Amino acid sequence: MFNSVKNLRSKMIYGNKMTSEKYIDFLRSQGVRIGKQTHFYSPQTCDIDITRPFLVEIGDDVQIARDVSIFTHGYDWSVLRGAYGEMTGSSGKVTIGNNVFIGAGTIILKGVTIGNNVIIGAGSVVGRDIPDNCVATGNPAKKVKELSDYLVSRKAKQLEEAKEIALEYYKVYRKKPPVEVFNEFFWLFETRNEKNPGYTSKLFVRMMNRELTKDLQKKAYMESQPLFKDYKEFLDYCFKDEKTN
């Protein structure tokens, strides 16, 4: 009963923005083009301009964080109208490619194209085109790193970040963390085996079986080697200099 009332209340408050799926269905019904596996993590806080919905095109596997706004028009003409009495149009198509992450608080302005395989940093203002295969951030947003270089830096940093997760979890809960806490870090310690890939969590299985990337992920996974033989050895590394009960 409680859940039913809660869901009804959510529908009344959020309407078409109640879930990512509902928001995408609504946007598509208006004419926005959106590909497969695109997801709004907080649709209630996002604002996709549907002044001219046919001017928004979002590709496959685009992950959109909270408080993201996309605009296909400007209202600058209202000032020009007031100053000179003239009307001037202001609009532009926004195109977002495939396999893109849009960080929290990003604003994407009219007339912008974001390429494929792009990470847009949180709080960016994207007012000009962003090329394929890069990381871009800032106001105005600009390319700061090739995506391949970013992969190298992530690989170099992830182990110490995983260790920090383990230690901070223990400080709060006074016990060592379950394997699910490590989410995208599981490549560090999961075994590679063709018959039994070694995913010790259903969460890891879901992450490896994404429709658009599962073959690529499996190939990369099987060709790589974990830093630890199993989860226990990984935890031993994290806590080797710590006193635990």
Image (tube, helix red, strand yellow):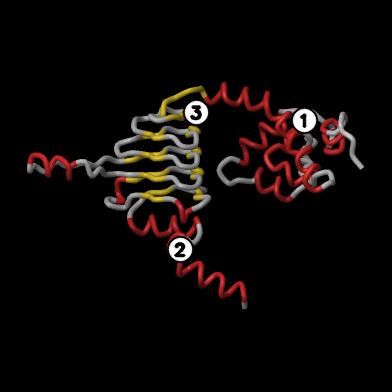
Q: Can you see residue 196?
A: no
Picture residue at 23% right of the left edge, 44% below the top = 75
Picture residue at 56% right of the left edge, 71% below the top = 6
Q: Earlier in the sequence, mark 3 or mark 1?
A: 3
Indicate the position of residue 150 as horizontal and vertical percent values.
57, 25
Label 2 amino acid?
A: Tyr
Characterize the local packing of mark 2: few (<14), some (14-19) or many (20 or more) Cα atoms within 10 angstroms.
some
Label 3 amino acid?
A: Val
Rounded to the nearest angstrom, the CA distance separating label 2 from label 1 is 43 Å
Q: Which mark is residue 14?
A: 2
Left or right: residue 8 versus residue 233 is left
Residue 1, image quadrant: bottom right
Label 1 amino acid?
A: Pro
Q: Earlier in the sequence, mark 2 or mark 1?
A: 2
Q: Residue furthest left?
A: 85
**Against 19, is 151 above or below?**
above
Characterize the local packing of mark 1: few (<14), some (14-19) or many (20 or more) Cα atoms within 10 angstroms.
some
Q: Secondary structure at mark 2?
A: helix
Rounded to the nearest angstrom, the CA distance separating label 3 from label 1 is 26 Å
